[in-house]
Image (tube, helix red, strand yellow):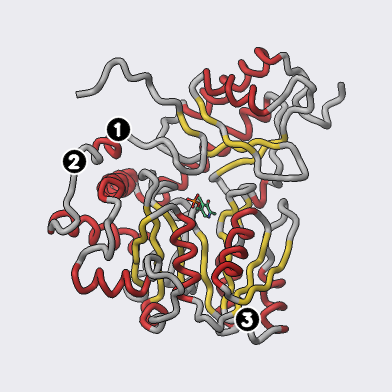
């Protein structure tokens, strides 16, 4: 069955695509017809399971969408925000800026609250902005800003938005399944996530968990044919099928990944494992002199940004390649002002994964002749 000549793939310490299990990958070794009843039962099961993760069975609908996660974010904004809507984006990073661009491209009126990238969004600022401008119809919040790793206060913002009677759209791409979101107590119009992040599936589809009443009222909003969530939802309800060709292998892999998620113990187990990875990473690289970019209090256990070594012998490309030779894939930084790199805490690798990565980094520092890691260290 397996090809012995195939080299073992490196461990991906990236926030999606990420390392998946053999079981998940094996689920892709079969072809499915998109009209097939067994395949459509898989789609239905995934939609159920995803709703259950946020306790949204009574109030919400899970609408899957082909494409990478951004396709689902764009579909949600385009479908759920009316053409005359006005979106407020509290902006503390790259993925917030992506939502702002989506609003502009789709011609939805946009306002932002801008923060430094090492700051958390503040519910009080959203409160003030909504009070000052009654024309704002929606707030679009990124839960974990993957650009840096900041965890934004979703529950507090959701309560503020609900109190003002506006809609909340949440990009929970990198937190969904690992950090608690409960539709029964945290009001939202839409939560958006994808197959290839904390559920540990392969990339290729996203899903929007939309409030049923909001979805019902969204007919005709979408400026796009293919990315119309309302149409996808109605068609799926009538036929059990995807409206256009589904990513069949991705769907089958996600189903298998969710089965393992449930076996592992669901959200508390998945979130707990990532939190232990995150602690081991920060303390392990900390012992080598690396400092995280963020304060511990606002760090999500998903991805950690570290300051790059303050040494003339350092450059990211060589560092990356040396660590890769030792079996681990790192992630570049996404900040313009400071030289950083990022390390993901998510994916299917055992408890030895992070200590192994720390050892690979230690070895790499030696190989590159880097002695000065922290900028603040006394030389
Ligand atoms: C991964 C991610 C996305 C989607 O990115 P794609 O490259 O389109 O998959 C959106 N928002 C956040 C916060 C993410 O982490």
- Residue 204 x, y percent position in the rendering: 38, 49
Nearer the observer, 67 or 329: 67
**Residue positioned 37% across, 65% down in the render:** 226
Q: Residues within 10 Å of mark 1 (few under 14, many from 20)?
A: few
Ligand 1 under 8 Å from disc 3 Cβ? no
- Disc 3 or disc 1, which is closer to the eye? 3
Residue receiving disc 1: 22
Question: Which of the two discs, 2 and 1, sits closer to the camera?
Answer: 2
Residue at which label 2 appears: 30
Q: Residue at x 69, y 69 (%)?
A: 112
Few, some or many residues within 10 Å of mark 3 (<14, 14–19, 20+): some
**Residue sticking out furthest to the bottom:** 134
Mark nearest the camera among 3 and 2 is: 2
Residue assigned mark 3? 136
Mark 2 element type: loop
Q: Helix or strand or loop: what does disc 3 sit on? A: loop
Is disc 2 surrounded by few (<14), some (14 to 19) or many (20+) residues within 10 Å? Answer: few
């Amino acid at each position: 069955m397996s090809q012995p000549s195939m080299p073992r793939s490196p461990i991906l310490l990236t926030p999606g695509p990420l390392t998946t299990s053999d079981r998940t990958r094996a689920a892709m070794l079969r072809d499915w017809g998109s009209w097939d009843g067994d395949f459509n039962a898989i789609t239905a099961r995934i939609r159920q399971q995803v709703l259950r993760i946020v306790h949204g069975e009574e109030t919400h609908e899970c609408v899957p969408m082909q494409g990478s996660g951004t396709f689902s974010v764009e579909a949600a904004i385009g479908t759920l925000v009316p053409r005359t809507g006005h979106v407020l984006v509290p902006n503390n990073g790259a993925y917030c800026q992506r939502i702002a661009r989506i609003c502009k491209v789709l011609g939805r009126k946009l306002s932002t609250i801008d923060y430094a990238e090492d700051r958390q969004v503040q519910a009080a600022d959203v409160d003030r902005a909504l009070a000052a401008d009654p024309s704002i119809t929606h707030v679009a919040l990124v839960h974990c800003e993957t650009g840096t790793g900041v965890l934004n206060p979703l529950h507090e913002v959701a309560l503020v938005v609900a109190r003002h009677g506006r809609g909340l759209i949440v990009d929970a791409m990198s937190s969904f399944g690992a950090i608690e979101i409960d539709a029964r107590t945290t009001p939202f119009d839409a939560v958006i996530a994808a197959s290839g992040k904390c559920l540990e599936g392969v990339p290729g589809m996203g899903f929007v968990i939309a409030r049923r009443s909001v979805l019902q009222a969204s007919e005709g909003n979408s400026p796009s044919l293919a990315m119309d969530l309302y149409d996808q939802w109605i068609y799926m309800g009538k036929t059990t099928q995807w409206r256009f060709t589904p990513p069949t292998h991705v769907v089958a892999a996600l189903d298998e990944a969710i089965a393992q998620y449930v076996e592992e113990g669901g959200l508390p187990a998945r979130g707990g494992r990532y939190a232990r990875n995150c602690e081991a990473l920060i303390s392990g690289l900390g012992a080598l002199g690396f400092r995280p970019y963020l304060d511990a209090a606002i760090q999500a256990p998903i991805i950690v940004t570290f300051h790059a070594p303050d040494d003339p012998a350092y450059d990211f490309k060589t560092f990356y390649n040396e660590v890769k030779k030792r079996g681990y894939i790192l992630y570049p930084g996404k900040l313009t002002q400071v030289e950083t790199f990022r390390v993901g805490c998510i994916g299917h690798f055992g408890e030895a994964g992070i200590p192994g990565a720390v050892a690979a980094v230690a070895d790499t520092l030696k190989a590159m002749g880097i002695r000065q890691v922290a900028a603040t260290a006394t030389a």
